[in-house]
Structures are given as C-alpha cells and as structure tokens.
Image: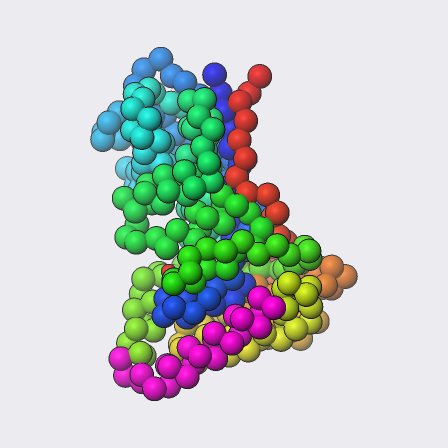
C-alpha cells in the first residue's frame, strides 16, 4: 500500500523576532509544497529518496548513503524521526520507502522543515489507516522536530497543518484568521544562508544593552501586528503594505536586516509593491513584497535585476492533506 501527503510552506507576514518577546506574529501558508509518499517494505529499514540532493537508508541508527555521502544523514534524519515518531506512537514496527519532493527552497525561512515533518507524519498516519486530527499532526511533528532542532515554537507545524493565515502569540497560542484576499506576494530570496539562533541571540544582546529602547520598539511592533490583523480582516491591502514597511523599519532598528535584503526591499517598493520587508530570521534568507495581481510580474522582474531570486506566491488556503493510492 502507498499513501501521499502534501503540506504547504510558510512566510511570516509581520512580527518575527518581536514574537520572542511576547508580541503577536502573523504567519501565512504559501502555495509551495512538500509531497511525501510512503510505501510498505518487506524489510525493517527506512529508505528515503528525495529531490533535496540526498538519498539513503536507515536501519535503526545505521545510515547507508546512496546519494549525497555521509553528510546526507543530517538532511534525512528529520524525515526518519518524523516517520518513527508516528510508528512509535501507534506501536507499529514496519519498514517504509519514503519519497520526498519539495518546491520549498530549504533553509531560507520558508518553513521547509516544518512542512516536511507535517507531510511525513500525515502520510505515515494515513498508511497506517489512522485519521490523525490536526492537533495530533502538530503534536507529533513538533515532537519529531524537537529531537532534531532545539525548541520549535510549533508555528511552522501549525501553519503547514492548517494552511491559511494564523496569528501566534506566546501567551495566547495559535488563532486561525479567516481572510478573503489571496494576498499576492513576491518573495525575494537573497540566497544568503543565515542562522536563526545567531540572529535571535543578537537581538537578545540589544535587549541587554538597551532595555528602554527595546521596550519601545516591542510596543511599536505590537501595534503594527494588531493593526495588520485588523487590516487583514478588512482586506485593506494598501494598509497592509504600509504596515509591512513600518515593520521593516523596526527590524532594521533591532539589527536583523542585511544589505542584500535592503536592496531587494527598496527595489520592490520602487517597482510598485504596496510594501516590503524581510521575512523570518533576517540576516539573509528571504524578503517579501506585497503587490496587486497586476504589478506582480513587474516586482518579480525588479527583484531579479536587484540580484534576488523571485518566487511568485500567494496564500495556500488548504493545509496538509493525504490520501491512499488506489
Ligand atoms: O527563520 P524562520 O523563518 O523560521 O523565522 C524565525 C522567526 C523568529 O521570530 C526570528 C524566531 C522565532 O523562533 O520565532
């Protein structure tokens, strides 16, 4: 038997970094997806084939590389862990062939690893004939990611599970936000690798050295997120764009932007975007530009000229879904 699950990637619309200090962040699923297909095997191994440039087989903790060398283990370990987490939860022991195909660029803050974990959990659950609830999928995929990363907030898993738009705040948890607009974006990938932990630490240093200033910036970010949520419910796109520009100013103030991001942000604005800002951890990775549908191609061309890789994207309403192959 064979089962497939598909889960979307994500982008943070507003509130990154400030969310660490209790302010709300707004996260949107994008129409870039991870597809995971799982199939029973006669032996007990987990054989993982991917278009991430690596392929290999795990038998318990022993890894045999097929493509990508020993280093591929690090890439495939989260997929193995997600599959094992579900098998262990239901006290099943079986071998699986797992095939992963992704259109989400990895390691640039677009939720690739969260989507891989969620799709793997859903596909394995489906193959075992279990109808996992959204809460089950989030809990199992977050547990699996905790083994691999340090302490995920669970937001990437939640958005890949639910799709649409979510508001996340430490004190309140996750709230789904129904929105009418497709929210057309152009994502600009700088191609610069960054380390989320290092950037979060950098902001922590600013808090230690300038506590009064950071308190004021946090309060401003709180207002930006709240007014953004209000504008989203009214579908007021120009206002959303302006608030994204203000948010970018705050992110620059706390030191997480980057020359390459700034270049793309200004290029997007100059070519008619409604607003533009970095998304996720900053320091490289991606920026997002909000556009009208008419201006989207022009903004994408401007990002390309400014040295970025443009990705046309919009809201993915549907979260993870899975099926058994006939
Ligand atoms: O790198 P990303 O897109 O997963 O975003 C990190 C978001 C931060 O607010 C910087 C960190 C966090 O854990 O919320």
Residue name at image x 77 percent, y 61 percent: 294
Residue 125 in percent (x, y) is at 43, 28
State yes or no: residue 43 in magenta. Answer: no
Can you give x and y, in whole percent of width and height, for residue 239 in the image?
A: 66, 73
Q: Residue at x 35, y 61 (%)?
A: 195
Q: Which quadrant would the C terminus be assigned to in this image?
A: top right
The image position of residue 263, as x and y in percent, is: 55, 73
For the residue pair 291 and 153, the one nearer the viewer reads as 153
Image height of 61 relative to 194, above or below? above
- Specify the quarter for ligand 1: bottom left
Image: magenta residue range: 208-230
- The answer to whether residue 302 is visible is no
Q: Is residue 44 in view?
A: yes
Side of 257 relative to 185 (left or right): left
**Looking at the image, residue 91 lies above or below residue 313:** above
Whether residue 229 is situated above or below residue 122 in the rendered picture: below
Is residue 157 shown left or right of residue 84? Answer: right
Question: Which residue is at the front of the view, 117 or 215?
Answer: 215
- Residue at x-position 29% and y-position 69%: 201
């Amino acid at each position: 038997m064979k089962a497939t699950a598909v889960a979307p990637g994500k982008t943070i619309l507003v509130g990154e970094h400030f969310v660490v200090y209790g302010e709300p962040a707004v996260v949107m699923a994008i129409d870039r997806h991870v597809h995971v297909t799982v199939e029973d095997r006669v032996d007990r191994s987990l054989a993982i084939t991917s278009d991430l440039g690596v392929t290999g087989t795990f038998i318990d903790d022993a890894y045999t590389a097929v493509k990508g060398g020993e280093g591929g283990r690090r890439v495939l370990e989260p997929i193995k862990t997600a599959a094992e987490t579900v098998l262990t939860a239901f006290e099943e022991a079986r071998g699986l062939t797992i095939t992963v195909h992704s259109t989400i660029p990895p390691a640039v803050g677009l939720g690739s690893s969260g989507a891989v974990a969620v799709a793997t959990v859903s596909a394995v659950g489906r193959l075992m004939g279990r109808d996992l609830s959204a809460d089950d999928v989030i809990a199992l995929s977050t547990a699996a990611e905790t083994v691999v990363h340090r302490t995920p907030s669970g937001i990437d898993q939640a958005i890949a599970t639910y799709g649409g738009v979510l508001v996340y705040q430490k004190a309140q948890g996750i709230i789904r936000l129904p929105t009418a607009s497709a929210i057309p974006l152009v994502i600009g990938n700088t191609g610069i690798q960054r380390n989320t932990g290092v950037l979060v630490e950098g902001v922590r240093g600013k808090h230690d050295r300038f506590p009064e200033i950071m308190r004021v910036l946090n309060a401003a970010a709180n207002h930006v997120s709240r007014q953004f949520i209000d504008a989203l419910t009214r579908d007021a796109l120009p206002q959303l764009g302006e608030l994204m520009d203000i948010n970018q100013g705050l992110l620059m103030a706390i030191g997480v932007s980057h020359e390459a991001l700034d270049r793309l942000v200004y290029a997007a604005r100059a070519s008619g975007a409604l607003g533009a800002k970095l998304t996720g951890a900053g320091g490289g990775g991606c920026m997002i530009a909000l556009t009208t549908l008419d201006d989207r191609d022009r903004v994408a061309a401007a990002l390309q000229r400014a040295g970025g890789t443009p990705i046309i994207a919009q809201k993915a309403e549907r979260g993870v879904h899975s099926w058994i192959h006939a």
